[in-house]
Amino acid sequence: MHKDEIADLMEEKYHALLNFLEVQDNEKWTQGPEGKWTTGQHALHLLQSIKPLNDVLSMPRFFFKYAFGKNDRELYDYDTIVQNYQKILKENSDFVFKASKNMKIPKLKDKTYILSRLQVESKKLQYKTRRISDKNLDTLVLPHPLMGKMPIREILMWTAYHVEHHTKQLQENY
């Protein structure tokens, strides 16, 4: 997938999420189905996953090679990334991203701030996606907490799907 298509896909997915959260009843922000995250926790989790990605993509490119190595396999397309993620999620159904373990329920007064930060971080990531070279997108890798090392292009495609995954959960269950 071309980097502009990835950036456009992220824009679409974050737009759908933010639109849904803007019109959702405020009481859902702090309540969720039994034993599940609240809407606020979903939003905070997505912020906790995009912020470190933006931070690491601001680092010098030589850092990536030194810290994580280089890609040594063929790139996966979007559908393959989604299928792999769904399969790994099923196999690790109890896995929770380290930053999201024991997450507190965000207060309703924090909703505007969290949604604003999500929007800003998504715009930053779209900008960075469009600016990074194709060579770096395909050869530099980053660690994914569940899926292992992935080329940056794949991490960016996964990020778009990750937002869609949580948006669907919210739409179906909240």
Image: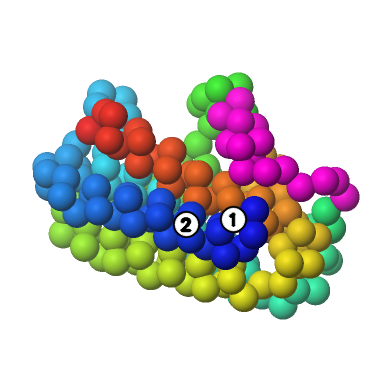
User: Residue at image x 22%, y 57%?
Assistant: 111
Q: How many angstroms separate mark 2 from mark 1 (CA)? A: 8 Å
Q: What residue type is disc 1 on? A: Leu
- Given residues 59 and 158, the one toward you in this image is 158
Q: Is residue 148 left or right of residue 125?
A: right
Q: Is residue 7 magenta?
A: no
**Which image quarter: residue 80?**
top right
Asked if residue 97 shows in the view, the reply is yes
Residue 145 percent coordinates (x, y): 62, 44
Residue pointed to by mark 1? 156
Q: What's the magenta region?
A: 72-87
Q: Residues within 10 Å of mark 2 (few under 14, many from 20)?
A: many
Whichever of labels 2 and 1 marks the residue nearer the N terminus, that label is: 2
Viewer-side residue, 144 vs 1:
1
Point out the image quarter for the C terminus. Answer: top left
- Circle 1 — which element? helix
Circle on res. 96: none
Report the magenta stretch's main SS. Answer: helix
Q: Which residue is mark 2?
A: 10
| Disc 1 residue crowd, few under 14, some 14–19, many 20+, Cα 10 Å | many
